[in-house]
Image (cartoon, grey):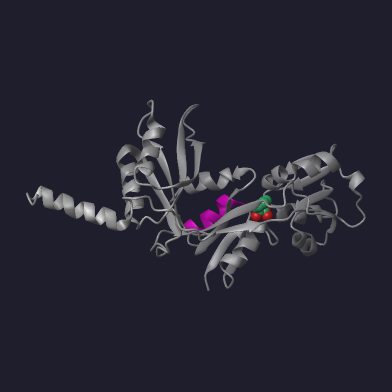
């Protein structure tokens, strides 16, 4: 039974994702995303499940940055999960008396309208996770009056639900990924996604366009691009890319090796089945057969067989 680290404690949305991605796994709650990934790097866990982005606010930057540094880890699965937020408090609390709210930053950004409307005077403080916030609010002397978390977290820590379904949109989904230490990649399924980070060799006009061209000329469709600061000064960035296809596909392999040629460093983050199981559209001339046929034609002309 694999042991998987996750953003804990018990009752987080990440735990819900883990239970779906790996139903039989042993669960190792971690205090934050870097700690969950570090548990995998150190061999204390076989893998980890972490949140990567949501459809309303975009990337969970801690996860992106942590995957780009330290020892390499590979994404081997993803999950899209709709999450529902509740306002939870100790029994007897009235909404009108809530002055301090505790929750994860991703929940703050997804419940902005509710907070502005119902809790206009409350201070909202960032917690390491929604369940950590619920656990803290449940303590008798807690400085916080309420948490925003999953209803199940309230049940687990003995809080009552003052309001449910308080997210700004009911159709928001969060994308979670399962990662492990480098090893064999998941087999191509025909509906896969590949992730990597790329560092520019040098800063010059068109540098980003040159990277994008490696994808474009091979008909590889991007599904996410994110720039993150390298930390070396204002204006210095590296790039996260998610794109359709598996690195075993000829067009994807060619694009990735093209990036390797023009970038100072490319960190491969894995090829894995897409959660939505959508197959990419293969543009004319970019299928595996097209690449194989072109390679054998090149061999022929190089050996004078015109
Ligand atoms: O804090 C949690 O419960 C998490 O798993 C992170 C998170 C927070 C808000 C929306 C989705 C995931």
Q: Is residue 11 left or right of residue 209?
A: right
Query: Which residue is most to the left?
Result: 304
Query: Which residue is most to the front?
Result: 284
Instruction: Tell me what residue is drawn at x 46 percent, y 39 percent.
Output: 239
Task: Pinpoint residue 194: horizontal percent, then vertical percent.
Answer: 43, 53
Q: Can residue 69 be seen in this snapshot?
A: no
| Rendered image quadrant of residue 288 | bottom left
Task: Pinpoint residue 82: horizontal percent, then vertical percent.
Answer: 66, 56
Q: Nearer the viewer, residue 190 or 246?
A: 190
Instruction: Tell me what residue is drawn at x 62 percent, y 61 percent.
Output: 17
User: In the displayed structure, would residue 34 be above or below residue 79?
Assistant: above
| Rendered image quadrant of residue 79 | bottom right
Instruction: Tell me what residue is drawn at x 82 percent, y 49 percent.
Output: 146
Q: Is residue 176 left or right of residue 200?
A: right
Q: Can residue 84 be seen in this snapshot?
A: yes
Q: Nearer the viewer, residue 266 or 143?
A: 266
Task: Pinpoint residue 258: horizontal percent, then vertical percent.
Answer: 31, 43
Q: Which residues are magenta?
A: 32-41
Q: How many marks?
A: 0
Instruction: Tell me what residue is drawn at x 55 percent, y 64 percent.
Output: 4
User: In the displayed structure, would residue 235 be above or below residue 144?
Assistant: above
Query: What secondary structure is the stretch in magenta mostly built from?
Result: helix
Please check the rendered image and state whether residue 40 is part of the magenta-colored stretch, yes or no: yes
Q: Is residue 86 left or right of residue 222?
A: right
Task: Pinpoint residue 266: horizontal percent, then vertical percent.
Answer: 38, 44
Please check the rendered image and state whether residue 153 is part of the magenta-colored stretch, yes or no: no
């Amino acid at each position: 039974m694999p042991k998987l680290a996750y953003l804990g404690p018990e009752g987080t949305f990440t735990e819900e994702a883990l239970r779906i991605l790996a139903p039989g796994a042993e669960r190792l709650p971690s205090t934050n995303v870097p700690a969950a990934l570090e548990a995998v790097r150190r061999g204390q866990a076989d893998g980890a499940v972490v949140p990567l982005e949501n459809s309303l606010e975009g990337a969970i930057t801690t996860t992106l940055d942590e995957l780009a540094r330290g020892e390499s880890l590979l994404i081997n699965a993803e999950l899209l999960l709709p999450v529902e937020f509740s306002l939870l408090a100790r029994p007897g609390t009235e909404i009108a008396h809530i002055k301090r709210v505790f929750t994860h930053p991703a929940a703050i950004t997804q419940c902005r309208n509710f907070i502005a409307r119902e809790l206009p005077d409350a201070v909202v403080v960032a917690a390491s996770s929604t369940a950590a916030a619920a656990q803290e609010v449940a303590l008798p002397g807690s400085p916080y009056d309420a948490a925003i978390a999953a209803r199940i977290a309230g049940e687990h820590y003995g809080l009552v639900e003052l309001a449910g379904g308080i997210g700004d949109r009911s159709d928001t989904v969060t994308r979670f990924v399962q990662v492990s230490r480098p090893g064999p990649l998941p087999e191509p399924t025909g509906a896969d996604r590949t992730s990597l980070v790329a560092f520019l060799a040098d800063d010059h006009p068109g540098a980003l366009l040159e990277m994008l061209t490696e994808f474009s000329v091979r008909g590889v469709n991007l599904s996410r691009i994110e720039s993150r600061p390298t930390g070396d000064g204002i204006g210095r960035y590296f790039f996260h890319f998610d794109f359709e296809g598996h690195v075993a596909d000829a067009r994807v392999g060619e694009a990735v090796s093209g990036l390797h040629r023009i970038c100072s460093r490319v960190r491969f983050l894995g090829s894995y089945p897409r959660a939505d199981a959508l197959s990419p559209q293969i543009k004319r001339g970019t299928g595996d057969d097209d690449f194989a046929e072109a390679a054998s034609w090149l061999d022929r002309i190089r050996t004078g067989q015109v």
